[in-house]
Amino acid sequence: MWAEGQTGTAPKVNFCNVVASPSDYNRKALSVEVIRWPSDHSLSLYGATCVPKEGYDVTTQAILPAAWESLPNGKKLRKFLHRGKSASVKLVGTFEGDAHRYGPDGARFRFVISEISSVEKAPPDVHP
């Protein structure tokens, strides 16, 4: 696992490019900047310029790392989660885009987080 604030060897990519070409990124470690959004039953994330909407399913389930709340950026993220607010986050993790659905909300993709690099308030006009 990488230390917080380091991206290791994971390439930084635009998340909208990832969900547009999921087979190119499937099972690869990536560094992304996304919006973490509270959903009904699980955590979801999306790119600021490719928001999920009817007819455009880019829903992505976010899987947090073990002991994430003990990390400094994990503590910041926890505050957003407890308030039910979205957050702009920089993450490192593994993208999964197989042909099946993920999690209780049936997300099209999954992103297994290994590092929370930064957490900030999301822009107010960016949400599904």
Image (cartoon, grey):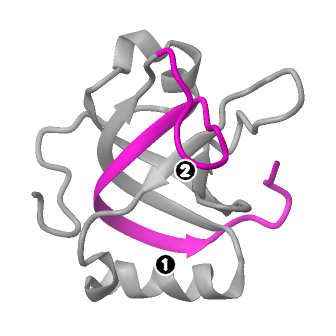
Using residue 45 as the reference point, say whether residue 3 is left or right of it. left
Residue 51, image x and y in percent?
75, 39
**For the point 86% across and 21% down, which residue is it?**
55
Using residue 67 as the reference point, say whether residue 123 is left or right of it. right
**For the point 34% across and 65% down, which residue is it?**
116
Q: Relative to 98, is 39 above or below? A: below
Residue for badge 2: 34
**For the point 12% across and 59% down, which residue is it?**
2
Tag 1: residue type? Answer: Leu
Residue for badge 1: 77
Tag 2: residue type? Answer: Val
State yes or no: residue 54 in magenta: no
Q: Relative to 62, is 21 above or below? A: above
**Which circle marks residue 65 in the picture?**
none
Within-10-Å neighbours for mark 1: few <14, some 14–19, many 20+: many
Question: Label 2's element?
Answer: strand
